Image (cartoon, grey):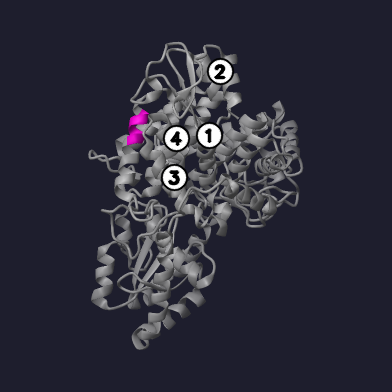
Amino acid sequence: MASNRLAHETSPYLRQHRDNPVDWYAWGPEAFAAARDRDCPILLSVGYSACHWCHVMAHECFEDAETAELMNTAFVNIKVDREERPDVDSIYMDAVQAMTGRGGWPMTVLMTPAGHPFYGGTYFPKPQFDALLHRVTEIWNGHRDELDGNIMALQEALQRSASVTPADVLPGLELLGQTLQALGQNFDAEWGGFGGAPKFPSTMSLDLVIRNFAAHRSEGAAQVVTTSLDAMASGGVYDHLGGGFARYSVDTMWLVPHFEKMLYDQALLARVYLHGWQVFGHTRWLQVLDETIGYVLGELSDGGGGFYSAEDADSADEHGHGHEGLFYIWTQAQIRALLPPELAEAAIDWYEVTAEGNFEGATILSRLHHRGELHRPESVESARQMLFEARAKRARPLLDDKVLTEWNALMLAALAEAAAAAQRDDWLEAAIKNANFLLRELRTPGGRWHRSWQRDGGPRHDALAADHAALVSAFVALAEASGQARWIEAARETADTMLDHFWDATNGGLFTTADDGEALIVRQKDLMDNATPSANSLAVSGLYRLGALTGEARYANHADQIVQLAATVVAAAPTAFSHLLGAYESRARGIAEIAVIGDRPDLVSALQRRYLPNCVLAWGEPYDSPLWDARRDGFAYVCQNYTCQAPVESVEALITQIEALA
């Protein structure tokens, strides 16, 4: 049969559905006009390319001729890639959660031709899905007024984030204490992380605990960090052959992952392991950092500087049927057939490969019973390389090759910071290449940004607040890592665009969408961290640091207003504001501005190697900032609010001044 409209899209997820018998539309005015003309409801289906259950529902329902006929007859059907359009996804996910108490993907929403939702859910097997279609069709055609109550109630729920009002003053640091207390209560002392299965990395919360340990040296914080980082890196959620992390674990012990590997997870986990190494000094965490960055540069790089979004959980067997995790699992027989006997036994023992297996008759490689013992002996390293090369010949999981601005910026920030701390010129080169790619491919000549890019389709979709906020933080981090002034200029320009087009002049904070962007049924605010930091928490971090480096008070003032806005809702879900609270702690305790003038690589590297979350660093090429005024070459200046201590020229004296700040 002929392909549907999705054949003309660039998103890999949408293109996966181009041969469905469903008459899909992409999100846009054409679909809504068709629904109005037909006076029929819209069926919105939202997912992403690496989503296992999205594939399952697609096979059971969207590839089925009978179900497709029901959909095509009674509905206008819209497919959305949530990674391209998180603004659309967020609105309708809030509706589903309000209706059902839970959310996830695939997401199915029934709505009016104007886009107002009245029913929704997540995964539906074919019998339940067909029954739902029949029931909704019956109500729409005969009892449509019954839906009005649902529509009005949901509209009110969807407007809540935009109606939050700010506190009168900035909060005290007791909010930070409450959050740390909540994390401690939710900590899994046996396996690390927070809560039970399914278990997600909770990277922003772990980073907040690392920050707390660095300041106070609490044994409890050390246990949270050490148990969690060692358990995650020892479990099957970590790829022991190729580096990088799967999205989450289906069990409490991090053994069995949902095997998709997302760029944002690599970025956020790289940052956590970097900070863990800097603070605790454990070289095993530096190894995890190295291997995770190696995975991104090796498998998710487009060659021109951009980073791809994800690899799928499923890969094909010899019959072409997709199986979750097939690419990653091993049997003893497979290992023995590939390796010399002594290396085979070393690998089987090291990676805990058993005859019965731990996943569908095979083994997910792990160090589960040797937690934290990650430094490989020579024989195991030889075996790892051979197994990695053999695995590369298997059918690889589907690659989602779109480049997302927000996720690339998260990776750029992690890469820049890691390059500076580990003094890795190759990582810094990759970071600069990525930043140049973003400026070249995703920024318009007028200075506006796109959210998504793909090689055969170019840039698509207007950038959202999260894209801008992540870029500001990334450009600031790259300026601090490279000493190149142009990245401060890029951060300034992006921050100005963000504040010009996303700022709420009434209550403060950033709206998700721009003032001149597509008008959705509500204009929401992204306040709470989820798998990634929220747009507003990213903005707080980036604006505080940019303001400290440039001396422009308006950046910090806007960040303060976001904190005041969040302060009224933090108590309801304190662990959803970890990224914001970490940045605000720096503001509350006083950000130190450090300038190294002239050619002093010894002073710069001494600062970059240390974990200094409450400091910003200006060095290299001067830019417009009071940090560069009337300074002497060859000296370092440690300042707070641009009032500086005596200039120093030795590493020892500089570190003494830094340590005195605490």
| Residue 326 x, y percent position in the rendering | 59, 50
| Residue 622 x, y percent position in the rendering | 36, 20
Q: Which mark is residue 293?
A: 1
Q: Residues within 10 Å of mark 4 (few under 14, many from 20)?
A: many
Q: CA distance from mark 2 to mark 4?
A: 21 Å
Q: Is residue 627 magenta?
A: no
Q: CA distance from mark 2 to mark 3?
A: 30 Å
**311 sits left or right of 144 in the view:** right
Residue 303 occupies which quadrant of the picture?
top left
Q: Range of the magenta residues?
A: 487-492
Q: Which quadrant is home to the N terminus?
A: bottom left
Q: Residues within 10 Å of mark 1 (few under 14, many from 20)?
A: many
| Residue 496 x, y percent position in the rendering | 31, 40
Q: CA distance from mark 2 to mark 1?
A: 31 Å
**399 sits left or right of 176 in the view:** left
**37 sits left or right of 68 in the view:** left
Residue 126's place in the image compared with 656, above or below, is: below
**Residue underneath mark 4:** 545
- Report the amino acid beneath label 4: Arg
**Residue underneath mark 3:** 560
Of callouts 3 and 4, the N-terminal one: 4
Name which residue lies at 53% across and 19% down: 605
Q: Is residue 493 among the parts visible in the rendering?
A: yes
**Residue underneath mark 2:** 654
Which label sits in the foreground, 1 or 4?
4
Q: CA distance from mark 1 to mark 4?
A: 24 Å
Q: Secondary structure at mark 2?
A: helix
